[in-house]
Image (cartoon, rainbow, N blue to C red):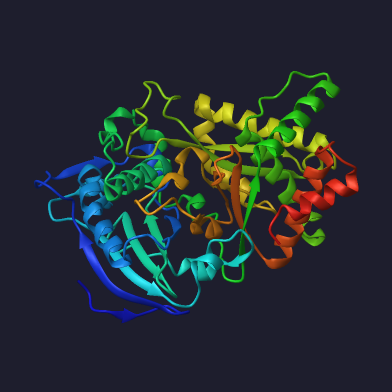
């Protein structure tokens, strides 16, 4: 245990650091070779999430809560023990890496307190400074560690908690990391039924040497892309209700009828992606948007491959089983007013999902080239998170999260995505932009949704929609 110390700014004070090892009998040494789907993320930014919790007046003392979280973490790590290990280069290999665990390995847990800002200010939807949230995250220890945690007590009155989680993406994808969090939370809450244990065997994925070598090559130019500073940016959360999502789907279907073409698949995910892709380009400042008005616009996102590989991969697989999807569309069509632009965006997203799901050789052979193309866009767009992760169900026994943020998305310029925390079937997404860009995006979203509505006059609907988004 480290002695108390002060670090960072804005009233953050570290109370102690602990090394938490998996509980129970001593686990055997384990070597998990990274597959080509792990190697994609070897040089990527770690994934950083912050979960905000409010402790109600009837909740137990915060020190008792912290004690339970530490004890239950040890039990959860018994099932997810590779996350206590580290990524290292495979002995005798130039371009192979592995996740290595040996008895005695542990995860660093930091306990801190913060008196600079309260949970109500941090957990709202309105624009907030990314730097205020980022200081609630731990540092990933050097030497190849893949997981670190920080629990921060938020003052005054110690009635708020912030759980900061950082995971190296080469160790596992969002399904694996959030399964770990659900398991930890269930153990802490004393749940009678705990989640199924993870599938740790990485031989369930048939490795592809030629693709693996490209991903781990030191000359891979794509590994430094999608990294941007977040200082000076504001993080804002928007919510699309189930009704708004249906309005987008109806508009896309109507446009297909108008054009006399087969309807494009338009799920809630596709509708959200299509709307945001359209609005991000349409709301770009003129000096930015007009640089290549005739060129293509690109969009990169990940899809889960567990049910799409041959053979299929278990749903509880602890590793990476996602592949990049690449959508593109003519910028003129993407930014045009009316439902036609949403049809273009959603059709391009649906086509990209189909292409990634097939996983044919040209898809993997051109992955680096496609990411480089996307990085040259005047308006870059990618996505982190998923509604399938159920992050708002991570309940440690003192209530569901008041808010969940993917801070690393602000560093890569990506949009974060989660289920609507109200449980109404909507979608919640966050994005970090400068104050000017934030306001332009908010107005564009409100205006676009207003045009899709037929429940009132355009002016009334536009005003109503604008009020529904954070300012």
**Residue 371, above or below 123:** above
Query: Residue 177: x percent and y percent?
Result: 37, 46
Q: In the image shown, does 446 or 176 lie closer to the viewer?
A: 446
**Residue 261, above or below 142:** above
In the rendered image, the quadrant that contains the N terminus is: bottom left
| Residue drawn at (34%, 33%) of the image | 316
Residue that sits furthest to the left in the current view: 25
All told, the count of numbered labels is 0
Q: Is residue 423 left or right of residue 282?
A: left
Quarter of image, res 242: top right
Query: Residue 182: x percent and y percent?
Result: 35, 44
Q: Is residue 70 left or right of residue 124?
A: left
Q: Is residue 298 left or right of residue 294?
A: left
**Residue 368, above or below 356:** below
Quarter of image, res 326: top right
Quarter of image, res 213: top left
């Amino acid at each position: 245990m480290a002695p108390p110390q002060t670090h960072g700014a804005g009233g953050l004070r570290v109370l102690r650091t602990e090394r938490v090892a998996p509980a129970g009998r001593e686990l055997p040494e384990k070597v998990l070779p990274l597959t080509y789907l792990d190697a994609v993320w070897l040089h990527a930014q770690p994934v950083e999430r912050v979960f905000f919790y409010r402790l109600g007046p009837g909740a137990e003392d915060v020190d008792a809560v912290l004690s339970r979280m530490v004890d239950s973490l040890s039990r959860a790590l018994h099932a997810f023990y590779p996350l206590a290990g580290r990524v290292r280069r495979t002995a005798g290999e130039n371009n192979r890496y592995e996740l290595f665990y040996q008895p005695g390995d542990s995860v660093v847990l930091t306990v801190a307190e913060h008196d600079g800002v309260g949970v109500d200010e941090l957990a709202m939807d309105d624009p907030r400074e990314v730097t205020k949230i980022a200081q609630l995250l731990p540092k990933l220890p050097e030497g190849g560690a893949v997981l670190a945690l920080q629990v921060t007590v938020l003052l005054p009155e110690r009635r708020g908690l912030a759980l900061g989680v950082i995971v190296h993406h080469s160790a596992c994808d969002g399904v694996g990391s959030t399964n770990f969090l659900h398991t930890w939370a269930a153990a802490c809450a004393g749940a009678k039924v705990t989640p199924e244990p993870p599938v740790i065997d990485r031989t369930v994925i048939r490795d592809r040497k030629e693709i693996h070598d490209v991903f781990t090559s030191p000359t891979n130019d794509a590994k430094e892309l999608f990294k941007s500073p977040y200082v000076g940016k504001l993080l804002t959360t928007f919510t699309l209700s189930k009704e708004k999502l249906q309005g987008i789907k109806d508009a896309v279907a109507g446009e297909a009828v108008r054009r006399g073409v087969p309807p494009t698949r338009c799920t809630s995910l596709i509708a959200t992606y299509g709307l945001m892709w359209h609005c991000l380009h349409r709301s770009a400042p003129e000096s930015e948007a007009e640089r290549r008005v005739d060129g293509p616009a690109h969009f990169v996102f990940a899809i889960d491959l567990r049910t799409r590989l041959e053979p299929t991969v278990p749903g509880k697989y602890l590793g990476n089983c996602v592949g990049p999807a690449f959508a593109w569309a003519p910028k003129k069509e993407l930014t045009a007013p009316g439902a036609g632009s949403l049809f273009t965006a959603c059709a391009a997203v649906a086509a990209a999902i189909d292409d990634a799901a097939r996983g044919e050789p040209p898809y993997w052979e051109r992955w680096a080239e496609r990411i480089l193309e996307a990085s040259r866009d005047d308006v870059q767009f990618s996505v982190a998170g998923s509604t399938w992760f159920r992050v708002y169900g991570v309940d440690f026994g003192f209530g569901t999260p008041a808010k969940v943020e993917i801070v690393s998305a602000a560093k890569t310029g990506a949009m974060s995505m989660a289920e609507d925390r109200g449980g109404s079937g909507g979608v919640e997404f966050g994005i970090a932009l400068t104050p000017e860009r934030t306001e332009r995006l908010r107005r564009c979203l409100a205006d676009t949704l207003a045009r899709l509505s037929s429940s009132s006059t355009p002016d009334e609907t536009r005003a109503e929609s604008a009020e529904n988004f954070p300012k």
